[in-house]
Structures are given as C-alpha cells and as structure tokens.
Image (cartoon, rainbow, N blue to C red):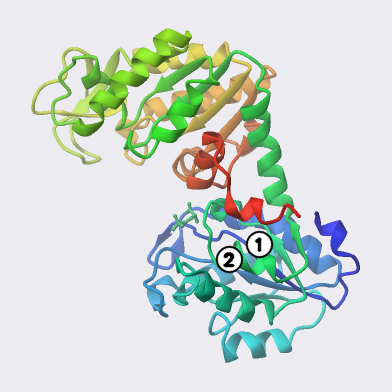
Amino acid sequence: KTIDDLGELRGKRVLVRSDFNVPLDGTTITDDGRIRAALPTIRRLAAAGGKVVVTAHLGRPKGSPDPAFSLAPVAQRLGELLGSHVTLASDTVGEGARSAVAAMEPGDVVLLENIRFDARETSKDDAERASLADDLAALADAYVSDGFGVVHRKQASVYDVALELPHAVGGLVQTEIEALSRATESPERPYAVVLGGSKVSDKLGVIENLLTKADRLLIGGGMVFTFLAAQGYSVGSSLLEADQIETVKGYLAAAADRGVEIVLPTDIVVAPAFAADSPATVVAVDAIPADQMGLDIGPDAAAAFAASIADAKTVVWNGPMGVFEFPAFAGGTKAVAQAMIEATAGGAFTIVGGGDSAAAVRQLGFDEAGFSHISTGGGASLEYLEGKTLPGIDVLAD
Ligand code: 3PG
C-alpha cells in the first residue's frame, strides 16, 4: 500500500520511520544526503495536513540515552531543509514524546529522540520489540515506512510497529525498490558491477549472487588485495583478509566457468603509511613493495575500469576504489564516478549504492543528477542486491 491508500490524512498522526543515520563530525553533519532524501515524503504528509511524527536512529548507542547520539543536529538540519520548525521530542516514546505529539497541529513535524536509546528497539526478543511497537503505535494513527537504509533490520520501529498500525510504503522506499529491482531483475546488458570498500567478508553474499547475474565485476578498494593475493601476488602491507583467500579463489573459478569477467587493477597507488601526506607512488600490480600499502587503484586501472563502464548498459557501484578522503588516493574513485556519469548521459542505467560511495560522490563534488539513482542504503542495498528478504519491506506486503 502506498500513502494514497491511507485515506484522508488531515489531522491524522502519521508515524514515519526515516533513516537519519548520517555521518557526524562532533555535532556537524558531514553528509546530509539521507535527510534530503527523506524530504519528499515528510513534505507530502505535512502538506496533506498530517501530523508528522518521525522516528529514526543515529549510530549504535547502548540502549539508553546518550547525548553523543542525540538527533538534535538532525532536527536542526531537517528544519532548515523543510523551511519550518521541527520539534525534537526530549525522549523516544516517553512523556516528552507524548506531550510533543499532543501539542501538534496539522502540518507540524516532530522528531522523536534516537529510537536506539530504547534497548527494546534492537532486542532479539519478539515480546520486547512488540512492547516498544505498542508505545510507538500509541503516538500515531498510521505508519509510513520510508527509512530504506534500515529496512534490512528486524527492529521495533522498522518491523513490529507496521504490524500494529495501518501502514504504507513511503516514496523513498518505493523509488529505491524500483531502481534496485530494475538492476537485479531485468538488467539491460552488458551489466557491470563495480565493487570496492575495505572488506571482502562484508560482500560475500553479494559477490555470490552477482556471479549469477552480472556480466562483469570490477574490483577495487581495500578488498582487491585479497583478490590479488588469491592470484599469487604479494600485496605488501595492504589490507588483506588471509582467511578469505580460498573463498576468493572459488569466486575466480566460478566466474571463469560462467563467463563472468572479473576486472582487477593492473596498477596500484601505494604509500608507506595510511595518511593523507604519505608519499604516493604508482606501481605495477606485481611490484607492490613489501613495506608499502595500496591505497588506490592506479591510473591504468582507472582508465580500464572507465572503458569497461563506458561499454555497459547497466552499472551498479558499491564501495570506493581507494581512500578518497585523501586527495592523493582519490583518483580511482573519481574515475569510476566520472565514467558512470558519462555512461548515464549515453543512456546507461546507473546506480550508486552504499553509504560510502554515495558520500564519495557528494564529497568529491560530482553532480548527483548525473547518475540514474543514488541509493540511501548501505547494508540494505547490498542485501537487496544479494536477493535477501528485507524484513522492513516484507512486513508491508499484506
Ligand atoms: C546504515 O547506516 O546502514 C543504516 O542506518 C543501518 O544502521 P545499522 O547498521 O547501525 O543498523
């Protein structure tokens, strides 16, 4: 069901689950992409005269109030972006939340304090989660699921509360599913997937699934060194998951069997230390010095990745190619982003998935409109690509 199916909203209290898990430097939000992505649904509900009660989490507090994880910076930013005041309730579902909601007028927006201040939110015990869902449901007449980044979590504000209130899927979750399912269910071919980020072990399920779907996998980021080690290269002091080498050998063999092309870098940018000012050198993949670590794919690799992307009709990218936060090691990530923008202009369907790659696109100054879709999901978009059932979506299917 969509928001239209909720009927007349004027004066109704609508609980919206958003994903406001944004990166913070102290109390400064360093990437507000997830807040901006939540605006259309909140605006729409407010414009229809709903009383919009938003619940969200920030970080992983230990199940009790902790000022370091307060949603205060988010309430502030949300208010700025909406152009209207957003009240931050002083607690999640207690007296502060009840009185803030009781004082609402149609069109108002209240943000409940970090839902993970309540240990029941993430409890494995169904009855505990249900009791928090009862408290949330008491604050609302209807529920809208719009926190795509968190739909892979079976948590009280994502899953259990939907069992208690008339519910609908929000516009952001709808957009995300439409985009991701276009890539997973009927990709126009060639279908290329660019994978990066630090660990292979975070991506095992997605790689296994993609080996049955994609035409080519381009591998960069910290995880590439486990692939290179699996091919017999020495990787110096680069990040390496030695316990995954055998698994990766299995992937390489499966890819060869199925005709899936695995594109690995031919050169690497190395440095003696993980630091912005560590002197960078480009070396061939078979000449990584023992005392240096790879911090980016090299320029030849970046050009080869760009050519492979240019020739694809569907491109999904998850995970930076290097330490893009340090300018000397941002070249590979920039090249992939630029190639995807050009591919999009040429008619390809392109998705940036995963918190870090989406943040890279924005921090490196690329125009978000140059991509077909930038997902707000990190783990959620990976699990979607893996083909897993996502509890927060599953629960909405009546
Ligand atoms: C995310 O940042 O991927 C989501 O907000 C989920 O957060 P979590 O991994 O702490 O559950």
Q: Is mark 1 within 8 Å of ligand 1?
A: no
Location of residue 302 with respect to 176 vertically, above or below: above
Task: Report the side of 88 relative to 122 (left or right).
Answer: right
- Residue farthest toward the left in the current orientation of the protein: 291
Neighbour tally class for label 2: few under 14, some 14-19, many 20 plus, Cα within 10 Å: some
Residue 308: x %, y % from top left: 50, 12
The amino acid type found where label 1 is placed reads Leu
Location of residue 38 with respect to 165 vertically, above or below: above
Residue 350, quarter of the rendered image: top right
Q: Quadrant of the N terminus?
A: bottom right
Neighbour tally class for label 1: few under 14, some 14-19, many 20 plus, Cα within 10 Å: some
Residue tagged 1: 81
Circle 1: element type? helix
Circle 2: element type? helix
State the separation of the CA atoms marked 2 and 1: 6 Å
Residue 203: x %, y % from top left: 40, 35
> Residue at position x 68%, y 30% from top?
182
Residue 98, quarter of the rendered image: bottom right
Asked if residue 335 can be seen in this view, the reply is yes
Residue 183, quarter of the rendered image: top right
Location of residue 184 with respect to 50 vertically, above or below: above
Q: Quadrant of the C terminus?
A: bottom right
Residue 50: x %, y % from top left: 81, 72
The disc label shown at residue 77, or none: 2
